[in-house]
Amino acid sequence: MERNRFAPPTSEVRDVERLTLADRSEVRYVGFCARCGASLVDAVVLLALQSPVLFAVYGLDYLDLASQGLSAGPVDVLVTWVFPFVAIVLLWHYKQATPGKMAIGARVVNARTGEPLSIARCVTRYFATALAGLPLGLGLIWIAFDRRKQGWHDKLAGSVVVRRR
């Protein structure tokens, strides 16, 4: 078959750029155990950042209030709810990883394009993680069985966790 000499030239680079993340053979998805380890690292880092602030403001009385499930005050709400939300969303957007994911060499990206997540996708992923954990953690355990290692929160946000190149 003869090639049309009037057709626009094709380029392998352009063809590779049009591939979605799922089509690229070099993509390595991060599995359940590695992500559990990363979450543990994140929890320790968050605790190390939150505890000194909470004890400095509320003293040892904070432990009594926290054990009863009560909020100690506005600083408690800011440090335990607002700060983690803002920090995690910004880390996913700008660094594509939390400290735990950085430690294991993983990053969170758009499942279709492989690009960094938008702020809207980061916020969706954050709140969807709580939803994924509600039915006995099934939405998180799903990571172990999914072909692309996506939990329900990843599917809802259109994200995937991959190894850094």
Image (cartoon, rainbow, N blue to C red):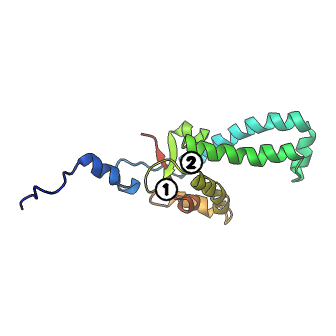
Which labelled disc corresponds to residue 149?
1
Which labelled disc corresponds to residue 35?
2
Which labelled disc corresponds to residue 32?
none
Q: Foreground: 90 or 23? A: 90
Q: Foreground: 22 or 16? A: 16
Q: Position of residue 136 (x, y in %)?
A: 67, 64
Please report the residue visible at 65 percent of the width from the left and 42 percent of the height from the top. Answer: 42
Kind of residue at badge 2: Arg
Q: Position of residue 107 (x, y in %)?
A: 51, 44
Kind of residue at badge 1: Lys
Q: Position of residue 158 (x, y in %)?
A: 52, 59
Q: Quadrant of the N terminus?
A: bottom left
Sequence order check, earlier mark of 1 and 2: 2
In the displayed structure image, the side of residue 26 where residue 94 appears, left or right: right
**Is label 1 in contact with label 2 (beta carbons under 8 Å)?**
yes
Q: Quadrant of the C terminus?
A: top left
Please report the residue visible at 70 percent of the width from the left and 48 percent of the height from the top. Answer: 85
In the displayed structure image, the side of residue 107 where residue 10 appears, left or right: left
Please report the residue visible at 61 percent of the width from the left and 58 percent of the height from the top. Answer: 124
